[in-house]
């Protein structure tokens, strides 16, 4: 059995061989997600990334629909960045039953709702930003940023991965991101928000809830 463990400090979320940061409050009073520098880099205060001719960056504060593509500057460090095209294709609500084989050992995980976002990422800039997490966050109804879980083992319902180790100009990848929303919190959007000062770009749309086939109880045998 795989163990689902959650470490809440500043705070880190771990799902059985998976690791990312959990949501915390920022100093400004808004809710945001803390993260380690290895998994969720922040952009430098002033960008030196060159935007290719003919590429229109998506305005900060834009609201897009599922299926739309946003073009953004993404920097892992001050001297390492590029322009990415991010597309949130769809979001599906999961269930605890999907995590069969994992040990849900505390109420935080047992009372959470799970969501799977299918996304594509394309590097249309000149830099290489390989080996880092896809820079997209979930946003729940209480306006909390939710980090995607970074799996180190395969999760068949939503196969997730970091960007490939080399992700240079022209590279593209499709992947699936898992978001855990505490206390049965409904997911309301997917967000690109690389820093606290950035007015987020969000994707919204209908979230699919798969129909569950009810389990049939065995018929009682008639006596006599």
Image: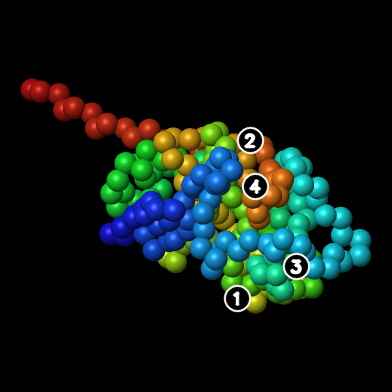
Q: At numbered mark 4, what does the secondary structure look like: helix, strand or loop?
A: strand
Can you say which quadrant of the picture contains the C terminus? top left
Tell me the CA gap for discs 1 and 2. Answer: 33 Å
Q: Is residue 59 left or right of residue 164?
A: right
> Mark 1 vs mark 3: which is more N-terminal?
3
Q: Which mark is residue 82?
A: 3
Q: Are marks 4 and 1 in contact (CB under 8 Å)?
A: no
Instruction: Please state if 60 lies on the left or on the right of 15 as rendered.
Output: right
Q: Secondary structure at mark 2?
A: loop
- Whichever of callouts 4 and 3 sits on the residue coming sooner in the sequence is 3
Of residues 145 and 216, the one drawn nearer to the viewer in this rendering: 145
Where does label 2 land, which residue? Answer: 206
Q: Residue 138, how many percent across, how many down? A: 57, 46
**For discs 4 and 1, the disc positioned in front in the rendered view:** 4
Q: Secondary structure at mark 3?
A: strand
The residue carrying pointer 1 sits among few (fewer than 14), some (14 to 19) or many (20 or more) residues within 10 Å by Cα, namely few
Question: Contact, CB < 8 Å: mark 2 with mark 3?
Answer: no
User: How far is mark 4 from mark 3, CA to CA?
Assistant: 18 Å
Q: Quadrant of residue 163?
A: bottom right
The vertical placement of 128 against 114, above or below, is below
Q: Nearer the viewer, mark 2 or mark 4?
A: 4
Where 41 sits versus 158, above or below?
below
Residue 191: image tag:
4
Residue drawn 75% across and 73% down? 127
Label number found at residue 217: none
Q: Earlier along the polypeptide chain: callout 2 or callout 4?
A: 4
- What is the C-alpha distance between the residues marked 2 and 4? 15 Å
């Amino acid at each position: 059995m795989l163990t689902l463990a959650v470490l809440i400090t500043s705070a880190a979320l771990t799902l059985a061989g998976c690791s990312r940061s959990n949501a915390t409050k920022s100093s400004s009073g808004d809710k945001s997600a803390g993260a380690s520098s290895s998994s969720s880099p922040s952009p430098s205060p002033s960008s030196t990334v060159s935007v290719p001719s003919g590429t229109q960056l998506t305005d900060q504060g834009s609201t897009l629909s599922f299926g739309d593509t946003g073009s953004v500057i993404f920097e892992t460090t001050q001297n390492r960045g590029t322009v990415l095209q991010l597309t949130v294709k769809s979001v599906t609500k999961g269930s605890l039953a999907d995590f069969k084989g994992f040990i849900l050992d505390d109420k935080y995980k047992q009372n959470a709702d799970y969501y799977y976002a299918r996304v594509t990422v394309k590097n249309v800039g000149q830099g290489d930003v390989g080996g880092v997490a896809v820079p997209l966050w979930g946003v729940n109804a209480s306006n909390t940023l939710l980090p995607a879980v970074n799996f180190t083992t395969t999760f068949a319902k939503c196969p997730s991965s970091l960007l490939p180790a080399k992700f240079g100009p022209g590279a593209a990848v499709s992947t699936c991101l898992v978001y855990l929303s505490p206390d049965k919190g409904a997911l309301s959007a997917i967000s690109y928000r690389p820093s606290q000062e950035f007015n987020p770009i969000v994707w919204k749309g209908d979230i699919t809830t798969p129909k569950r086939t009810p389990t049939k109880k065995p018929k009682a045998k008639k006596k006599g």
